[in-house]
Image: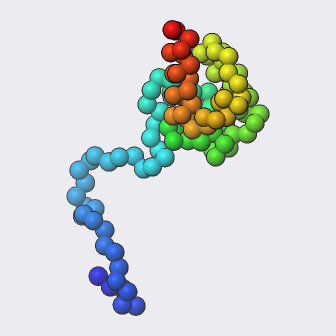
Amino acid sequence: MTDDSGILGVSRLGDQSKDSGHHAPPPGTTPPATPTEVKIAAIWQDALSGIPIYRESDFIAIGGDSLALAQVVTELETAYKLKLTVEGVANNLVLKNMADMIDRLMNRSKA
């Protein structure tokens, strides 16, 4: 397939009119999947004025700052009855990673 300039173009794979109804969400829009992710997403939404939060969301990239992060740390400590450091949380700013960190700490505290 060429355009008017004679440059070879790239065609789309498959026929868009044949919709199977099964689509993976676009990258970066996977909803929170675990109970911990759901709870942390709600805490983030409170701190960030209710914006949508996805598993791949990075707290700073979606508008969080140091003051909002401090609020999140306080709320996480209350929700999970853990002692956290801002530095520890700041090293896990993607929702999925933060949830994994909380789950690891909760499992350690049960042992």
- Residue 10 relative to residue 37: left or right: left
Front-most of residues 91 and 42: 91
Residue at the image point whose x is 63% and y is 12% from the top: 81
Q: Which residue in the rendered view is the most extreme toward the top?
A: 111
Question: Residue 56's spot in the image, x, y percent?
Answer: 51, 41
Q: Is residue 43 above or below residue 60?
A: above
Hey, which quadrant is residue 4 in on the image?
bottom left
Q: Is residue 83 above or below residue 47?
A: above
Residue at the image point whose x is 66% and y is 29% from the top: 88
Question: Residue 72's spot in the image, x, y percent?
Answer: 68, 27
Count of numbered labels shown in the rendering? 0
Colour approach in the figure: rainbow
Question: Residue 52's spot in the image, x, y percent?
Answer: 55, 39
Quarter placement of the N terminus? bottom left
Q: Inspect this view and state whether residue 86 appears.
A: yes
Front-most of residues 18 and 97: 97
Residue at the image point whose x is 64% and y is 21% from the top: 76
Residue at the image point whose x is 45% and y is 49% from the top: 27
Q: Which residue in the rendered view is the most extreme toward the right?
A: 67
Hey, which quadrant is residue 92 in on the image?
top right
Q: Is residue 80 above or below residue 66?
A: above
Hey, which quadrant is residue 89 in on the image?
top right
Q: Inspect this view and state whether residue 45 appears.
A: no
- Residue 8 relative to residue 75: left or right: left
